[in-house]
Image (cartoon, grey):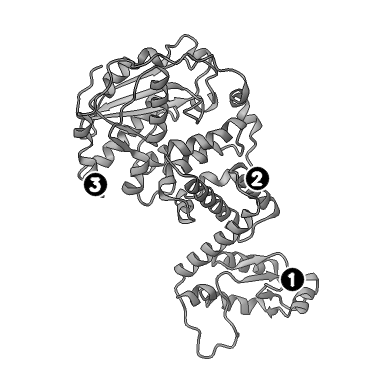
Amino acid sequence: MESRRGGFAIVDVETTGFSARTDRIVEIGLVLADSDGEAYDSWTCRFNPEGPVGPTHIHGITDADVANAPLFADTILDLVALLRGNAFVAHNANFDIAFLRAEFERAGWDFPRVPVFCTMDESWYFLPNLQQHKLADCCMEIGITQERQHSAIHDAEATAKILRYFLDPRLQPTVRPEHNGLTTAAMSVEWPNGPCRDRIVQEPRSGGPQQNWRNWKKRGQSSPLIKTLDAFALASAIDAGSPTNSKAYLALLLEVLEDGVITANEGFTLADLAQMYDLSKDEISAAHRGFLTALAHEALADETVSREEREELKHTARLLDMPESMVTDVVNVARAIRIAHRSDELIPVELPENWLLGEPLRVGDRVAFTGGDQAQRDELEACAKELGVRVMSSVSGKTTMLITDGEFSGTKANAARANGTRLVHPDEFRILLDYIQPSLVIAKDR
């Protein structure tokens, strides 16, 4: 395999964990492409990580598969020959580079600063309507078929196809000016020809948190709310206050939390990830708060946060080293954002001149139902939630109105009388929904 200078080296690594400081590369896949992104050759290799291979359920590699594989240090000369003179490409490139740099350092080599094209970062520009920006999501959006996910060479080949798509001059948006000089800059990078210090001899890794990987799936029973993590847009965390430079960190955080647990090893990994992405303590705090707020959005999909969902949010806060008291704050922020979005999406309808139903219904109002025809009630509740009205299971002083036909008396009716809550007939409520208005708080701010 011969590398042509002035093109791209598209890389993917499979690892024993998420921390470049303590985990190792177990497999690498590399595709070479010319300056237009047209692939012309590929290379792959597995390595003995000198310890447990980690999450076999993810990358499919067992300890037996790499028992007789070479050490990473023994293949560096071949790898450098392929990387030399080419711009570096990867999906979430900081992750791959951090692991490569750590492996080079263990072998006594220096890993130079190279021009980088991160297809994950660039997907926010080239695929602006994409909700998730993981490799599989980008492939699906473009129409690329992945042979097998989490196989280093197959992921590298998929990334190469994404690069080719992004660089296609016939498509919009076109490449940015900073993209054009990457391959030229790569040709001037000086790669070492050998080690510059002694190899770091490490004891074989065994025991401790690493062994937890083997039974991670069995131990990590995903909670209902955590299971929705793949469904929400990563952009919502950014909208909720996470720094824009934390996108890749948040994407990896999704993977760490995939099973709803963070092992002791992964807890330390979060700090390592922050360092990997050069995020300050304040930026990490903001990223975690935005992440928790985005998760609260999921809990509010039905306009209420159940007791179980609140406990899940508290558990996630603890995992991210945040106070449980922050859950109340982020739920309120998420609710306010939802109300604002619903109000922004609402096309205001003027009330008729002969309007006789009093104060109109508004986005974010709290309402409750009691009695009445069940089919009609279900229909009205669904419509109310769709429009951003909060349907509550009980009546309090904050309840805007109780929808009732007056034929049923019970706890809610008694609470409504005690609080002076407005009573509205279902037929009138249907009209109120037809003329729903933006949130009064949002309206005052405009």
Q: Please, what is the three-letter code of the amino acid marked with disc 2?
A: His
Say if 220 sits above or below 213 in the image.
Answer: below
**Residue 282 or 149: which is nearer the viewer?**
282
Within-10-Å neighbours for mark 3: few <14, some 14–19, many 20+? few
Q: Which residue is mark 3?
A: 176
Task: Say if mark 2 contacts mark 1, CB within 8 Å.
Answer: no
Give the residue drawn at x 36%, y 14%.
Answer: 75
The residue at the far front in this view is 197
Say if 21 sits above or below 408 in the image.
Answer: above
Within-10-Å neighbours for mark 2: few <14, some 14–19, many 20+? some
Q: Which residue is mark 1?
A: 371
Task: Specify the quadrant that holds the C terminus.
Answer: bottom left
Q: Is residue 439 visible?
A: no
Q: Please, what is the three-letter code of the amino acid marked with disc 1?
A: Gly
Q: Please, what is the three-letter code of the amino acid marked with disc 3?
A: Arg
Circle 2 sits in a helix, a strand or a loop, which is it? helix
Labels 2 and 3: the sequence-earlier one: 3
Q: Residue 302: percent from the left, percent from the top? A: 60, 58
Give the residue drawn at x 46%, y 41%.
Answer: 249
Task: Say if mark 3 contacts mark 1, CB within 8 Å.
Answer: no
Say if 72 sits above or below 102 in the image.
Answer: above
Q: Residue 123: percent from the left, percent from the top? A: 35, 44
Residue 315 marker: 2
Labels 2 and 1: the sequence-earlier one: 2
